[in-house]
Amino acid sequence: EPEVTQTPSHQVTQMGQEVILRCVPISNHLYFYWYRQILGQKVEFLVSFYNNEISEKSEIFDDQFSVERPDGSNFTLKIRSTKLEDSAMYFCASRGRQNTEAFFGQGTRLTVV
Amino acid sequence: AQSVTQPDIHITVSEGASLELRCNYSYGATPYLFWYVQSPGQGLQLLLKYFSGDTLVQGIKGFEAEFKRSQSSFNLRKPSVPWSDAAEYFCAVGAAGSARQLTFGSGTQLTVLP
């Protein structure tokens, strides 16, 4: 069964460093998403991406964040200068045109120290 | 803007007992509604979804949910819960528009006693 794959599963980084979280969505899906879940809190929408551009973003998704689909298969989330409060589980999701639900990856736990 | 409320932060049931997890939503139009489950250290797995039609929807693992427009609710039910169902359960509503990002509730942690 096709699945969304995220790497790494856990990343530790120092405050101020740049991180790139990677996702391989389900092939032939067209909509791509990033969500985050701070420990003990709800899952929050960050950004959606369609047709090689951002279609929606939340207020969380400020200038420190960017997304890219560099090669037609990977979908990345970059945080330019990490802050302690960026520590969270980051989930990638994808959705096909005909499907109506999003499929989520296993998540990347980001720890900023 | 849409919102989702899961009034029960934590529920404990005995193995074999029935289960109902509550979800209330706020949305201006006909909502797309979902229930996801998250086991410790795992991602989000879709249990079931509602878009239109029959208001009682069946999902995986023996779960079902009923959409009640008059009550703005989409409660998740299961007649008999095994120990392995212990997890966190999230209700979510999908936004209108092509992006249709999800707004999640704060989750209900389910503990199952042997």
Image (tube, rainbow, N blue to C red):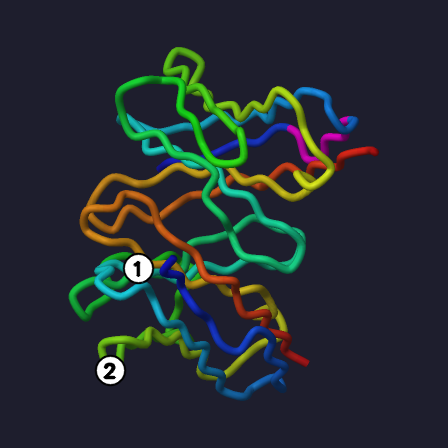
Amino acid bearing label 2: Asp
Which class describes the residues within 10 Å of circle 2: few (<14), some (14-19), or many (20+)? few
Crowd class of label 1 (few under 14; some 14 to 19; many from 20; radius 10 Å): many
First along the sequence among labels 2 and 1: 1
Judging from the image, what secondary structure is the residue with disc 2 in? loop
Residue at 42% across, 43% down: B103
Question: Which residue matches tag 2?
Answer: A71
Q: CA distance from mark 2 to mark 1?
A: 17 Å
Range drawn in magenta: B8-13
Label 1 marks which chain's residue? A
Chain ID at mark 2 = A
Q: Identify whether A37 is placed above or below B107.
A: below
Q: Is residue B80 left or right of residue A7?
A: right
Task: Write down the residue under mark 1.
Answer: A48
On the same chain: label 2 and label 1?
Answer: yes
Tell me the kind of residue under disc 1.
Ser
Q: Residue furthest right?
A: B114
Q: What's the residue at 25%, 46% (across, down)?
A: A99
Q: Quadrant of the N terminus of chain B?
A: top left
Q: Position of residue B21 (x, y in %)?
A: 60, 26
Q: Is residue B76 above or below residue A82?
A: above
Figure quadrant of residue B61: top right
Q: Is residue B17 above or below residue A34?
A: above
Q: Quadrant of residue A38?
A: bottom right
